[in-house]
Image (cartoon, grey):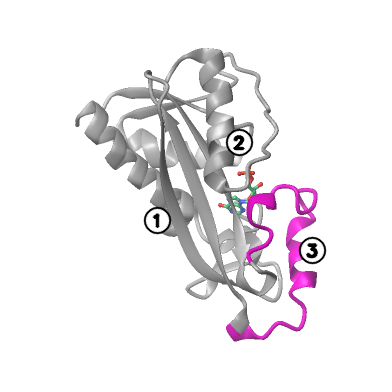
Amino acid sequence: MKLKLVMATNNANKLREARELLSPLGIEVLSQREAGADCDPEENGATFEENAQIKARAVFDAVGLPVIADDSGLCVDALDGAPGVYSARYAPEGERCAKLLSNMEGVSDEKRTARFVCAVCFIGEDGKAEFVRGECEGVIGHEERGTNGFGYDPVFVYGGRTLAEMSSDEKNKISHRGAAMRSLYRLLKERYGE
Ligand code: IMP
């Protein structure tokens, strides 16, 4: 597939992961800055999908090219789904994992289940919004481990290792963003052909 998309994000890690996942499939991902858009809209939606659409729409209105936006976060069962859509605002970057671990103090191993969620909004040339979603089930560990990745990766344990202990290839195979980008590819294939 030969296609150029703009990704509505200022998060370099999300951009890198989207590129790792989509460029081998022939999809070139431009950052919003490269496309000439300087957007940082208020993410005041109640769901990942609403926030993804807010971000995608702002950039689509600015550049008029096909756009994708990812809204993602971590939902922890013992915290009634928190931090959820507030994952980025839970604490400043660098303090998020520590705050989560302290809020999970005393929670037993069986009750530490959690999932990463990634909703992607795609807006094509016609301005219509479409959505795909990916999830990754794991547990919250008892300490930070590993130095790869970003955000909550050092405390999210999948198959005995944190996502921060995996290479980006390993993480992309099992991650919420990987699953969402593979669904996005199927959607784009239906629309634009092989
Ligand atoms: P937003 O989608 O820009 O609102 O931000 C989502 C926040 O969730 C990020 O800033 C991270 O803290 C967290 N997050 C989303 N995806 C990941 C991931 O793959 N690993 C670790 N943290 C993530």
Q: CA distance from mark 2 to mark 1?
A: 19 Å
> Which residue position is annotated with label 2?
12
Q: From the viewer's perspective, tell me whether residue 82 is left or right of residue 54.
A: right
Which percent across, then down, holds residue 35? 53, 16
The amino acid pointed to by label 1 is: Lys
> Which residue position is annotated with label 3?
99
Q: From the viewer's perspective, tell me whether residue 87 is left or right of residue 95.
A: left
Image-quadrant location for residue 147: bottom right
Which percent across, then down, holds residue 118? 50, 49
Where, quadrant-wise, is the C terminus in this rendering?
top left
The local secondary structure at tag 1 comes to helix
Question: Is the C-beta of the residue carrying label 1 under 8 Å from the nearest atom of ligand 1?
Answer: no
Farthest residue, direction front: 46
Q: Nearer the viewer, mark 2 or mark 3?
A: 3
- Looking at this view, is 158 or 134 the one in front? 134
Q: Residues within 10 Å of mark 2 (few under 14, many from 20)?
A: few
Residue at image location 37% in from the left, 19% down from the top:
126
Residue at image location 73% in from the left, 61% down from the top:
97
> Which residue position is annotated with label 1?
173
Which percent across, then down, holds residue 130? 40, 36
Q: Does residue 118 lie above or below 42 as drawn?
A: below
Q: CA distance from mark 2 to mark 3?
A: 23 Å
- Looking at this view, is 50 or 155 the one in front? 50
Which percent across, then down, holds residue 140? 63, 71
Residue at image location 35% in from the left, 29% down from the top:
27
In the image, the segment drawn in magenta is 81-110
The local secondary structure at tag 2 comes to helix
The local secondary structure at tag 3 comes to helix
- Looking at this view, is 60 or 22 the one in front? 60
Q: Residues within 10 Å of mark 1 (few under 14, many from 20)?
A: few
Where, quadrant-wise, is the N terminus in this rendering?
top left
Q: Does residue 162 lie above or below 32 as drawn?
A: below
